[in-house]
Amino acid sequence: MLEAQQLALGELAELPTGVDAVPFLTQLTQRGPGADALGRTAALLTEMPVELGPHGWKLTERPGADARRAEAFWREDLGALAIAAHGHVGPLTVEVLGPWTLAAQLWSARGDRVLADGGARNSLALALADGLPTLMSDIVAQVPGAQVTVQLAEPLLGQVHAGVLPTFSGFSRLRAVAGPEIVEGLEPVLAAVRDAGARSVVHLGSTWVGVPPVVLAGADALGLDLADVGPGGWNENAWELIARAMERGTKLWAGLPPAQISQCAGPALGQLADLVGVPWRRIGLPAAQLDDVTLLAAPRRALGSTDEHRAELANLGRVAEALAEKSEA
């Protein structure tokens, strides 16, 4: 974990001049149960203990070895962060699952997904809202100069809203959750982040239909994997929603896939820049606001070697530099 954290911070320190880095707490999910996104987030819940069951993480009556393992991974991660980020002053991002994706993946003690029970999912959102400030204070205790941003990963929000998630039996689908309920579930979590003095990003993956609820719930930024929005990153309906969000002051965190590499020309960084820049111009957003876009990796495959990770971060830096130049044109 320490090596991974040092790699991330070290490579981000080498970005081109004029490109601001957004360091992040790394995740090594291969360490096993408790290091995965669901286990990590569930371990933060206040007074809602979890354990591993036959189908994955589920609520239980009292915490056991599974929860203790997840908490131990958090301690290991924060310890590595304290060493790697010693003396760091500035932005620092940590990612956890958002309340809707959490409710869609976590099982109740004796039944279906937590999502199936309106009362349980409300309690889950409140338990996450209550636990996140402790995580943020722990981060600042390890890195006193950190300006924390919490990224809530909500890749399943679209499926929650559409009502396509299967029940435990698999013979039917869970009821669709309406837009106002989506907003209500996000609000307490985003409010807790804001009240703790941190900023918030809700990353939707490719689920652009979730943009309005995220904006209405009060997120500081929204994240989208642009390559999955449409061909060449273009989808008029999606970009209309993005433009309205930006007009309301919500920033864009644009997820970009790994660059395609040609043996002759090297990585096709222009294609990555066009995933942002071309739709931006077509929808009529001011070029100057490109400077406010944050780029992040959205790999469609697992990056293996250390060199691949280094190349990915370096490519993002060069794409950010190109977009910064366009913002000044």
Image: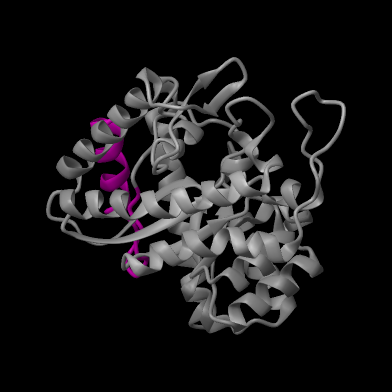
Decide whether residue 17 is among the magenta residues: yes
Image side of residue 311 versus residue 141, left or right: right
Image side of residue 216 versus residue 3, left or right: right
Decide whether residue 53 is among the magenta residues: no
Q: Is residue 154 visible?
A: no
Q: Is residue 105 above or below residue 179?
A: above
Q: Is residue 150 visible?
A: yes
Name the spot of residue 156 as percent of width and height, x first.
67, 45
Name the spot of residue 198 as percent of width and height, x first.
35, 65
Quadrant in the rendering for residue 195: bottom left
Quadrant in the rendering for residue 237: bottom right
What is the number of callouts on the image? 0
Q: Is residue 294 above or below residue 73?
A: below
Judging depth in this view, the residue of 104 and 268 nearest the camera is 104
Outermost left residue = 87
Judging depth in this view, the residue of 145 and 162 nearest the camera is 162
User: Which residue is painted at 67% across and 77% down in the image?
Assistant: 243
User: Which residue is painted at 18% across and 56% down in the image?
Assistant: 88
Image side of residue 77 versus residue 131, left or right: left
